[in-house]
Amino acid sequence: MTGNSLTARKSVADILAADAEGKESSRLPRSLSAFDLVALGVGATIGAGIFVLTGTAAANYAGPGLTLSFVLGGIACGFVALCYAELAAMVPAPGSTYTYAYATLGEACAWIIGWDLVLEYAMSAATVAVGWSGYARSLLADAGVHLPAVLSAAPFTPLPDGGAAWFDLLAAAVIGLLTLLLVRGNRESTRVNAVMVAIKVAIILSFVGVGAAHVDVGLWSPLVPENTGFFGAFGWSGVLRGAGVVFFAFIGFETISTAAGETRRPQRDAPIGLLGSLAISTVLYVAVAAVLTGLVPYRALDVPDPIAKAVEAIGFGAFAVAIKIGAILGLTTAALAALYGQARIFYAMARDGLLPPAFARVHPRFRTPAASQVTIGAVTALVAGLVPMDLLGELVSIGTLFAFLVICTAVLVLRRTDPGRPRPFRVPGMPVVPILGILSCLALMLGLPGDTWLRLSLWLVVGLAIYLGYGRRAARLRRLRAPGLGAGAAR
């Protein structure tokens, strides 16, 4: 390790050595296959974005141009996915973006990225849980079961009777159940995830097939509605704003990089999982957006369950039940993957001393970071029950774009600082692809509202204060007590 306490970097060799030489009781088992990774990536990606945010983005920003928004988002993610694939194959250790930042930008930046990833993973899980709650309540209502209205949304949300909600009980409950499943182990959770992914993809394909036969092409004209006079309110700026908002839909494929340390053959399987799951998800998104805006006038899509509304609009009310089941499964797998990824980020940070050591403990029976998983689950459940979805969604998008920008930068830095390191997968077109990834992420970030930037800034300031108050000192003490971490570990 080199540098002072703020700029200390862990070399790739140190990262791999620490992962290999750690006690067996503190290591996560390598049990995942390429199929598991693709299923994890699709499960993480196909969630709230396709079942909830498609309607909001079409109605408020892009209109039928939503298909172009998804294409832009997919292209930007493609640049980033190639960078992730190189890093995940080269550094198959827990931590994902946090770990790569530690190897390239130093300890302080790594902490900031780790803190930022809370927005991507934990807050993403909370957002998805709120969407899950909406679809679950709708499905229960179809069966004649009605939960108390005060337990159906975040506090102060207006209710039809004139009162206000107290807490979103179902959103918090699903986070709790998924946390218990994840604590029990990888094999159990990946099997459940694979089954749910298969069902929801089948339902999505059914919607595309059935809906395509009833599309009114007149609803696609004009493809890009005229701008209303404000940036992001339709027109091409609306397509860009829509891409920034639905970028949330692509969040999840990079969860695979957090699982690289638990993969049997990470050098081969991690790139397959990353690129394969992104390709499948992008095709599904574009197809659903095209069919959705061809079935219902885009201004009528600002509802919690836009796909179910589209199915009902063409007279297939019974199929709407299947759509709601698919949405519930899709949102469940997305929340599952996000909670999984967050626990692995905290596990890696705790091993470096930046978080309390309890987060790095592996359960002796289940072989999972149980303390980390339970803590994350409890906090996320509270957020899901207390915070409205629209506020969460934009925070998750900008936090993820920031992390993606760092990934593209990390590839460029490591090509210069560690050129001789074996790279089982190499980003093609260097340095053009990472630079295009950086520019794409910046463009999408600029398309988001100014208050979202303010919230991100406040979040990062809070994170920096925690680092200066705890993480910096704790990490330095750990280096002093463990000189085997690498040359200069105590510097």
Image (cartoon, rainbow, N blue to C red):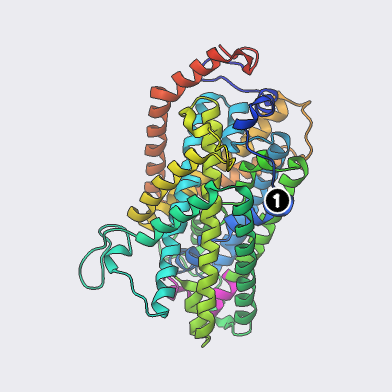
Q: Where is residue 97 shown, x and y percent of the image?
A: 59, 37
Q: Where is 421 relative to 182, above or below?
A: above
Q: Is residue 145 visible?
A: yes
Camera-side residue of 56 and 17: 17
Q: Which region shows up in magenta?
A: 289-304
The residue drawn where x is 44% and y is 53% is: 176
Say which element carries label 1.
Answer: helix
Q: In the image, is 136 to the left or to the right of 412?
A: left
The residue drawn where x is 62% and y is 69% is: 199
Query: Based on the displayed image, in which of its 4 quarters is residue 375 positioned?
Result: top left
Query: Based on the displayed image, in which of its 4 quarters is residue 60 positioned?
Result: bottom left
Tell me, yes or no, whether the highlighted magenta stretch contains residue 200. no
List the residue tagged with mark 1: 273
Q: Where is residue 69 shown, x and y percent of the image?
A: 56, 61
The residue drawn where x is 69% and y is 58% is: 279
How many neighbours does mark 1 have within 10 angstroms: few (below 14), some (14-19), or many (20 or more)? many
Q: Where is residue 275 shown, x and y percent of the image?
A: 70, 51
Q: How many marks?
A: 1
Quadrant location, the N terminus: top right
Camera-side residue of 165 and 276: 165
